[in-house]
Image (cartoon, grey):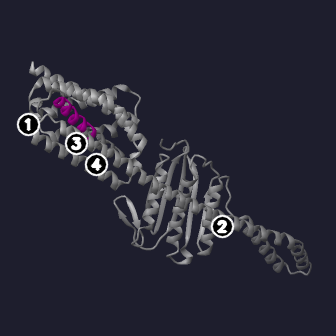
């Protein structure tokens, strides 16, 4: 009879755990395949593996197996924006499982008024404990998923996420230690109260960190708004200046034509040709400003063109007139302003004759491609996959991190490479992508 309870508890426990795990992944990620048999096969492999590791009897191995299996299944069967998210959600899920196990054991001890050690040593009570845990899990996993989706774990800073995970692990260790100390002489009622209080503290800290992140995000958006307003004012000022120049040119055009006619009449063909070239250059200067149907992009690029003019930087803008309506104006400013500001700053450190920025924006195979290429002086400093600086500071690194964060919202990718003294950033985004809920 004990074997029946033992194996029944194992199959029920890991069967429900695997089911909830797949439901969790299906809600947090996007499935890669339409064939259901692949998911069923991985589910069965997970359950069989979990039972096998449980038979070994080493708790840490069971936990490691669960973590590694969830990460592997997530990568194999689901699509996620980043591997970091997969790791974070895997940790959250298994901390959730641990809390369920602890609460189910404590609930049975409180109801039966037996000690923790008696419950753990009695196969029938252990089966009831497992059943309570599975019922608790089935009744609460949708709430956990909703909390993860609502609070957007990815918006919380990495350091804050690490702090929360370390805190949760500490709490689990603390509760386990207390349980070991009292398992011979207590039914766990006080430990149940302590556990619920710690869970409440965790939820409060998550909400607090989210509020802090939202505050930083709001400050960032306000800075971007100020930057947009400044660029807009500069752009309108340049338009006003252009209008004034064009009005004066048109006003003097009659005199220019008369002068040209007199030069040709007097046989001064070379002087007439040079004079005509001067007029054409003046007209080109008035009509050569960047224009596209996206008002924000027009303002941004014209602002950067003016900065390039001030520093003697040649800028080549090969920009298709695409529909950027799928990108939020703040993200548009973040992407183009940071990329072009970094390129301008890098060019300002080299000889004037070598200063050149190539900006290309075009559609390729259904994707919008943005490329910014410029020469640089110095040594590129990388930390893992992120560029820190070309000058020992962190301005460029922060700028590119902001660009990467903005691009990620639209399921885009950002590639960075350096070759023969040139640095290039290339971005690919689908115009059909949507931001996170």
Q: Secondary structure at mark 4?
A: helix
Q: Which mark is residue 310?
A: none
Cα distance between the residues tagged 2 and 3 = 60 Å
For discs 2 and 3, the disc positioned in front in the rendered view: 3
**Quadrant in the rendering for residue 65:** top left
Marks 2 and 1, how far apart at CA: 76 Å
Sequence-first tag of 3 and 4: 4
What residue sits 30% from the left and 41% below the top? 71
Q: CA distance from mark 1 to mark 3?
A: 17 Å
Dot 2 or dot 4, earlier in sequence: 4
Task: Write down the quadrant of residue 51 in the picture.
Answer: top left
Magenta range: 95-110
The Cα atoms of the two marked residues, 3 and 4, are separated by 18 Å
* Image depth: mark 3 or mark 4 in front: 3
Q: What residue sits right under mark 2 in the picture?
A: 234
Is 102 covered by the magenta stretch? Answer: yes
**Mark 1 → mark 4, Cα distance in angstroms:** 31 Å
Q: Earlier in the sequence, mark 1 or mark 4?
A: 4
Q: Report the residue marked by disc 4.
A: 165
Residue at horizontal 47%, vertical 55%? 217
Dot placed on the residue nearer the N-terminal end, 2 or 1? 1
Label 2 vs label 1, nearer the camera: 1
Q: Earlier in the sequence, mark 2 or mark 3?
A: 3
**Marks 1 and 4 close (CB-CB < 8 Å):** no
Mark 2 secondary-structure assignment: helix
* Residue located beneath label 1 in the image: 185
Tell me if label 2 and label 1 are in contact, CB under 8 Å. Answer: no
Residue assigned mark 3: 194
Picture coordinates of residue 107, whole percent (x, y): 21, 31
């Amino acid at each position: 009879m004990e074997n029946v309870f033992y194996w029944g508890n194992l199959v029920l426990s890991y069967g429900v755990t695997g089911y909830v795990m797949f439901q969790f992944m299906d809600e947090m990620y996007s499935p890669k395949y339409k064939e259901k048999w692949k998911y069923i096969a991985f589910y069965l492999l997970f359950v069989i593996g979990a039972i096998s590791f449980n038979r070994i009897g080493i708790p840490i191995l069971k936990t490691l197996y669960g973590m590694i299996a969830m990460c592997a299944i997530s990568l194999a069967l689901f699509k996620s924006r980043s591997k970091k998210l997969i790791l974070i959600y895997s940790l959250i899920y298994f901390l959730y499982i641990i809390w369920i196990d602890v609460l189910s054991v404590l609930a049975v001890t409180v109801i039966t008024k037996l000690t923790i050690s008696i419950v753990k040593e009695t196969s029938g009570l252990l089966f009831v404990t497992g059943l309570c845990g599975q019922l608790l899990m089935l009744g609460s996993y949708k709430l956990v998923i909703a909390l993860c989706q609502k609070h957007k774990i990815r918006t919380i800073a990495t350091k804050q996420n690490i702090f929360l995970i370390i805190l949760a692990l500490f709490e689990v260790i603390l509760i386990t230690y207390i349980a070991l100390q009292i398992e011979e002489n207590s039914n766990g009622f006080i430990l149940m109260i302590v556990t619920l209080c710690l869970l409440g503290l965790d939820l409060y800290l998550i909400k607090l960190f989210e509020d802090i992140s939202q505050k930083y995000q709001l400050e960032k958006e306000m800075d971007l708004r100020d930057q947009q307003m400044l660029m807009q004012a500069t752009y309108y000022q340049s338009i006003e200046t252009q209008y004034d120049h064009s009005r004066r040119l048109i006003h003097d055009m009659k005199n220019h034509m008369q002068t040209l006619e007199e030069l040709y009449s007097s046989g001064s063909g070379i002087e007439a040709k040079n004079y005509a070239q001067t007029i054409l250059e003046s007209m080109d200067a008035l009509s050569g400003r960047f224009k596209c149907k996206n008002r924000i992009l027009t303002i941004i690029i014209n602002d950067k063109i003016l900065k390039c003019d001030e520093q003697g930087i040649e800028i080549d803008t090969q920009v298709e007139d695409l529909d950027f309506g799928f990108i939020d104006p703040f993200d548009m400013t973040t992407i183009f302003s940071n990329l072009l500001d970094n390129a301008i700053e890098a060019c300002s450190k080299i000889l004037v004759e070598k200063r050149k920025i190539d900006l290309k924006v075009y559609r390729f195979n259904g994707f919008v491609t943005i490329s910014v290429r410029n020469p640089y002086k110095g040594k590129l400093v990388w930390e893992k996959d992120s560029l820190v600086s070309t000058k020992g500071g962190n301005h460029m690194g922060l700028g590119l991190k902001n660009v990467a964060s903005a691009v990620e919202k639209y399921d885009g990718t950002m590639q960075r490479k350096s070759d023969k003294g040139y640095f290039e950033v290339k971005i690919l985004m689908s115009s059909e992508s949507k931001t996170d809920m």
